[in-house]
Image (spheres, grey):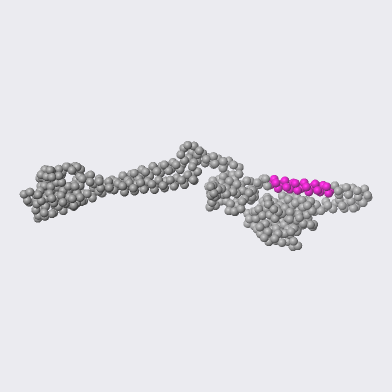
Amino acid sequence: MSGSWSIAKQLFALQVLVVTLLVAVCTTGAVLLARRDAVNAAIEEVTAVAETIAHSPAVVEALHTADPTESLQPYAEATRIATETDFIVVMAPDRTRYTHPTPELIGKPFAGSVDEALHGGTVIEEYRGSLGASVRTVVAVFEPGTATVIGLVSVGITTAAINRNLAAQVPAVAAATGGALLLAALGAWLLSRRLRRQTHGLGPAEMTRMYEYYDAVLHAVREGLVVVDRDGRVELINDEGRRLLGAPASGPADLPREVAGLITEQRPTVDEPVLVGDRILVASRRETRFEGRTLGTVLTLRDHTELRALTGELDSVRGLTEALRAQAHEAANRLHTVLTMVELGRTDEALRLGTAELALAQQLTDQVVGALQEPALAALLLGKSAQASERGVELTVEPDSRIEGEPLPGRDLLTVVGNLVDNALEAVGGIEAPRRVRVLVRHADGEIVVRVSDNGPGLRPDQAADAFRRGWSSKGQGRGVGLSLVRQVSERYGGNCTIEQADGGGAVFSVRLPVPA
């Protein structure tokens, strides 16, 4: 892992920086608003105090005396202390002070604007006077019942006092700011921790390289890959998987029922044959887990269509070879017998012995080829007949069998008939003679009926219910493929598969395949 910061660390640092800036801006704004509110509150307070003093009869009476300071100074100081203002100045219309917190300034001119007050208005201003910068109000004192100004009253609060009141609120603001920063940092840390778990501590460059590598690998492998999340939603299908499943080259894709069934099953799936369209796929399913958590399911698909076809042909050739070898051995014995009988002069018996087997084989060939005009199916049954004969099994094609043309793709018919016949031959392999297998393949009333019966041990009802299920077999592990493929072909055409008990023992497998119009 490189020395660069992971995405989680970068996001955490960015969040802390942004939150700190936001909190700083908000705190600064809150302080400015608080100071403005404090100044407005001070203005309202000094205006109310000044107007109250200006309307006081005692003040009006004192202004008519020879020495207004004598009575007004104690009154102004008492009021200043009671109202917690910084100065109260009562003055003559010519600005001469009658009161002041600093006695030395009494009798001296008032510093500040009074013009509007002299005309009956109110002066509100921030001004730096003898006590420093302050917020002050100046109002007029009128002669009772007239509009004559006989004096002025100025009340103020210094800016230093306002700032001291604001400074008293700083601990609360600082605590709120610190709490907000702490909560924001905690939230950012929790989010960073979650993101670090999800990205495994990787940085942007590493994640980019990983995505590029994984994407290249997923689309380069020759196996189909289907990735499904825990909720069963398809998250990814690579190019080979889309080709095998017949899905669109891009965009969402619906999984075929057979493949979807494999994903939802709880049992492990290893090299399970699945029939999808005209392809035989081998599927393996595996759950993906990380740190004990189930992330989803990965399904791998391999195309075994050609391999299955070649394997089937190889099995047929092997069976025919073994049958021919056995027949050649038997024919040699018969030939020696015929020659000996001819030498003994028993020509008629030799002729009957030599032509009997040939007539039987020709009769079977004529019957199968005449009834089944689908050449691959006819060849399959002839080969199975020879294989059955070599095993000591009497394989009979029902006289009612009839297939004209190619109502269904030959590969599907071969899958159904071949697997049913193989299953029947194996069923009778463990019993005493006579061993019999009967085959019916007929096209009538818009459907193809395939029925294969045997006189083997048969199946119990519980076995019959599971016979067409994938992986089930009465012959042990690693089997259960053929009948599963038969069921998949039947379901694809909307047909059905049934198993019944044969008269006298054994089983009857029937498959009905509707023929598309």
The residue most toward the top is 3
Task: Give x and y (percent) for residue 97.
Answer: 11, 45
Task: Give x and y (percent) for residue 358.
Answer: 83, 51
The residue most toward the bottom is 503
Is the stretch drawn in magenta largely helix, strand or loop? helix
Residue in view at x 56 percent, y 48 percent: 288
Assess whether residue 107 is covered by the magenta stretch: no
Residue in view at x 61 percent, y 53 percent: 267
Can you see residue 253?
Answer: no
Task: Give x and y (percent) for residue 2.
Answer: 49, 37
Assess whether residue 320 is covered by the magenta stretch: yes
**Viewer-nearest residue: 228 or 495:** 228
Residue in view at x 23 percent, y 50 percent: 41
Can you see residue 452?
Answer: yes
Task: Using the rendered view, name the quadrant where residue 515 is placed.
Answer: bottom right
Task: Give the extent of the magenta segment.
Answer: 309-331
**Viewer-nearest residue: 354 or 30:** 30
The residue most toward the left is 66
**Viewer-nearest residue: 465 or 495:** 465
> With 18 as the anchor, is 332 left or right in this view?
right
**Viewer-nearest residue: 211 or 510:** 211
How many numbered circles does the render carry?
Answer: 0
Task: Give x and y (percent) for residue 296.
Answer: 55, 49
> Where's the C terminus, which quadrant?
bottom right
